[in-house]
Amino acid sequence: MDSNSKTSRRDFLRQLSLITAGTALTTLPFQDVSAKRRKSRKIAPTDKVNLACIGIGYRGAEIINELYKTGQCNIVALCDVDMGAKHTLEIMNKFPDAKRFHDFRDMFDKMGGKIDAVSVGTPDFSHFPATMLAMSLGIHVYVEKPMAHTFNEVELMIKAARKYGVVTQMGNQGHSEANYFQFKAWKEAGIIKDVTAITAHMNNPRRWHSFDANMKSMPGAEPVPPTMDWDTWLGTEQFRDYNKDYVNGQWRCWYDYGMGALGDWGAHILDTAHRFLELGLPTEINMLYAKGHNKFFFPYSSTIEFKFPERKGMPACKVTWYDGLDNLPPVPEGYGNVVLDPNIPPPSTGQIMPSKLNPGKIIYSKELTFKGGSHGSTLSIIPEEKAKDMASKLPEVPTSTSNHFKNFLLACKGQEQARSPFEVAGPLSQVFCLGVIAQQLNAKLKFDPKSKKFTNNELANQLLKGAEPRKDWKYFYKL
């Protein structure tokens, strides 16, 4: 084990052990899936996509509303493990004729042949099984970012999307907005070239900042709400008693269920840089700073360095991620004022703090420096004097023909190409999985992108796969 790791091998192996109590009855056994497979329905341009929705509260509800607002889909089924809870009522009332389910396995078993596509707006750790089952049935998938909870799950999802020939889209919506088209145009015109370093930052309050880093165990048992199917919520993960601090957004705090600030905001900040600079997978992931490191939840503050090698004539590139209230990155001379960008949505915990840096990035090339935000925010050249000098050389940037949600539905109908399919979003999500492993171990890690293994830390290799899934959920990994 790397000498910088602060957690014993015994502790992590204990966390990775399988606890098989309380598993739910599977409604769609693995041996029956092949009999239910079908090719995706050809949808005429004038037809609407029959959409089922898994996760209908909070972010799930926002996704459903955005997809429905395009006018390209019918909402035919709703699925949520907490169906009937207060946060699910808006969508239930808006679509009273949609069939309702607590368990996505039951939904696909009973309605799979009537569903063209599905949205998955659930906690990070539960993206994988619902997405894999949908794809195996020829159903197109829109899944919220990050794609999955472990490196191996993302790998299987990429392969399954290719195997089943379905349309896929990860929910990093900036990938269909002005940021995407500008970065693409500037890269193709040679304005963005020879990038050697990127600083990415998200320094707003996070849910776990109020937790005690000296906690000795996970939160204790509380009564399960009457609307909640707790066992199905747990899905592939080991059984644990219900606690309100695991659900309704709190799941993002814990290594067992979420991906922290990096998984939450990284896909909105680094997506275009990763794609158009063709960064792929890093060779080193180094924890440079971890305030409040512990074995249960994410550090209060993190600085993570990713080293990407030379590729296709582009120089090696170092990406450094900063999160935490006390962990602002250095900014170059001429950065300019911090102005709240209306294109950056606030975090789920409240408003963006105008006294701090906007969530965003600074891109350093050999000739130019670029300042950028998150989501759809566009880049600017800094300092301002240099921007004025470059103004006449900048290419015209095309406008979007569809937003991220409409793009997915039109792709299901064969009218557009999905802009963030799993083959594109997958390696980006895997970068975040590698970063989370470095956070969890508080270690410097060396990684081989060809073998997709760590070369200096066996415990880190175990975390690429994560904990053994519960018995009744293993079949998702065989689809």
Image: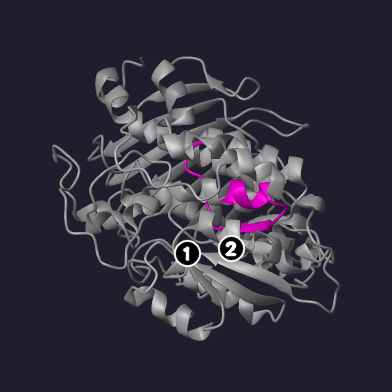
Residue 439, how many percent across, how many down? 36, 35
Q: Which residue is at the front of the view, 27 or 307? A: 27
Residue 356 visible somewhere in the drawing? yes
User: Picture coordinates of residue 224 (x, y %)?
Assistant: 23, 59
**Residue 171 image position (x, y, % from top left):** 58, 59
Q: Is residue 146 magenta?
A: yes
- Please tell me which residue lies in front, 222 or 62: 222
Residue 183, picture quadrant: bottom right
Query: What amino acid type is highlighted by mark number 1?
Result: Gly
Secondary structure of the residue carrying tag 2 is strand
Between 3 and 169, the one nearer to me in the picture: 169
Query: What residue is disc 1 on?
Result: 55
Residue drawn 62% across the image and 63% down it:
111
Question: Closer to the N terminus: mark 1 or mark 2?
Answer: 1
| Placement of 304 over or under 14, stated as above or below | below
Q: Which residues are magenta?
A: 131-150
Q: Is residue 277 visible?
A: no
Identify residue for label 2. 119
Residue at (28%, 54%) from the top-left corner?
246
User: Residue 296 magenta-drawn?
Assistant: no
